[in-house]
């Protein structure tokens, strides 16, 4: 047991690793994660709209995209984008490896978020669209003002779960070989492990990931509980707002 504590929980090594993990690793991890999430949100909504189209030739590209990027291992997609493209002479971001990591994770996130949005939109009762159309509202306007807002509210828990998954998958960008100054949390821990032969820095990197993901997990549980109880996610203020709208 003493040997295990020495190799995985050396407080001195964990303390020494903390500055680099906070100033460099956390910054890069959050940059990659947030960038991928933003790409996934915007592109995922467009993808969802493609896949719910009534025209098969509009749906087909979206379905193929989802099948490919959900079917490939994340690490393979990251390798093909971050290593394969530069080898092939395609360098849209020059030598900025972080940007390739953001793009790769963003493409993966688009597939998963697109499916989440599609499920949410299609879960809205068809009568909502029929009622809007009967009032003379154009299809796209009804989608923008009525259907999509209701669908988004229903997918908040799985969407937050996807944010957690993206944050954890950001550790896979280490295969792109980020240089010092651009290393993510896992890469810093791995480098220190190789230098010292001790895994305490990797454990500290894991703790840093938990600091990010555990609050998000609690948020998912809170949202899921409120939705199952039929309560608005915004709490009392949201309930009051909905009450006023209903009265009017």
Image (spheres, helix red, strand yellow):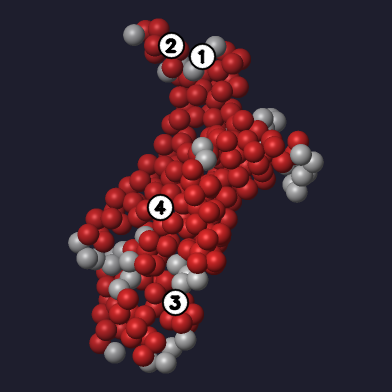
Residue at mark 1 to residue at mark 3: CA–CA distance: 55 Å
CB under 8 Å between callouts 2 and 1?
A: yes
Q: Residue at x 65, y 33 (%)?
A: 176
Crowdedness of circle 3 by 10 Å Cα count: few (<14), some, many (20+)? some
N-terminal-most mark, 4 or 1: 4
Crowdedness of circle 4 by 10 Å Cα count: few (<14), some, many (20+)? some
Which numbered dot is residue 153? Answer: none
Query: In this rendering, which labeled residue sits more in front, label 4 or label 1?
Result: 4
User: In the image as oriented, which residue stretches furthest toward the front?
Assistant: 56
N-terminal-most mark, 2 or 1: 2
Classify residue 90 as left or right of residue 193: right
N-terminal-most mark, 2 or 4: 2
Query: In this rendering, which labeled residue sits more in front, label 1 or label 3?
Result: 3
Judging by the rendered image, the residue that carries numbered circle 4 is 160
Which numbered dot is residue 6? Answer: 2
Residue at mark 4 to residue at mark 1: CA–CA distance: 34 Å
Which secondary structure lies at badge 4? helix
Q: Is residue 207 visible?
A: yes
Crowdedness of circle 1 by 10 Å Cα count: few (<14), some, many (20+)? some
Q: Residue at x 57, y 50 (%)?
A: 107
Judging by the rendered image, the residue that carries numbered circle 3 is 143
Judging by the rendered image, the residue that carries numbered circle 1 is 198
User: In the image as oriented, which residue stretches furthest toward the left?
Assistant: 229
């Amino acid at each position: 047991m003493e040997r295990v504590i020495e190799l995985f929980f050396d407080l001195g090594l964990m303390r020494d690793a903390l500055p680099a993990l906070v100033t460099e690793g956390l910054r890069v991890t959050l940059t990659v994660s947030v960038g991928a999430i933003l790409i996934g949100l915007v592109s995922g909504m467009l993808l969802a709209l493609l896949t719910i189209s009534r025209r098969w030739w509009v749906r087909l590209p979206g379905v193929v995209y989802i099948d490919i990027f959900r079917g490939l291992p994340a690490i393979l997609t990251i390798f093909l984008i971050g290593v394969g493209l530069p080898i092939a002479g395609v360098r849209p971001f020059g030598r900025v490896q972080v940007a390739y990591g953001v793009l790769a994770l963003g493409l993966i996130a688009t597939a998963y978020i697109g499916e989440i949005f599609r499920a949410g939109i299609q879960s809205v009762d068809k009568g909502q669209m029929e009622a809007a159309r009967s009032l003379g509202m154009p299809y796209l306007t009804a989608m923008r003002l009525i259907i999509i807002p209701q669908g988004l509210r229903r997918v908040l828990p799985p969407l937050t779960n996807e944010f957690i998954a993206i944050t954890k998958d950001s550790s896979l960008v280490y295969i792109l070989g980020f240089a010092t100054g651009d290393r993510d949390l896992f890469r810093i821990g791995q480098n220190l492990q190789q230098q010292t032969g001790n895994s305490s820095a990797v454990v500290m990197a894991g703790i840093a990931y938990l600091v990010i993901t555990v609050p998000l997990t609690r948020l998912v549980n809170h949202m899921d509980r409120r939705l199952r109880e039929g309560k608005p996610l915004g709490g009392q203020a949201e309930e009051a707002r909905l009450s006023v709208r209903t009265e009017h």
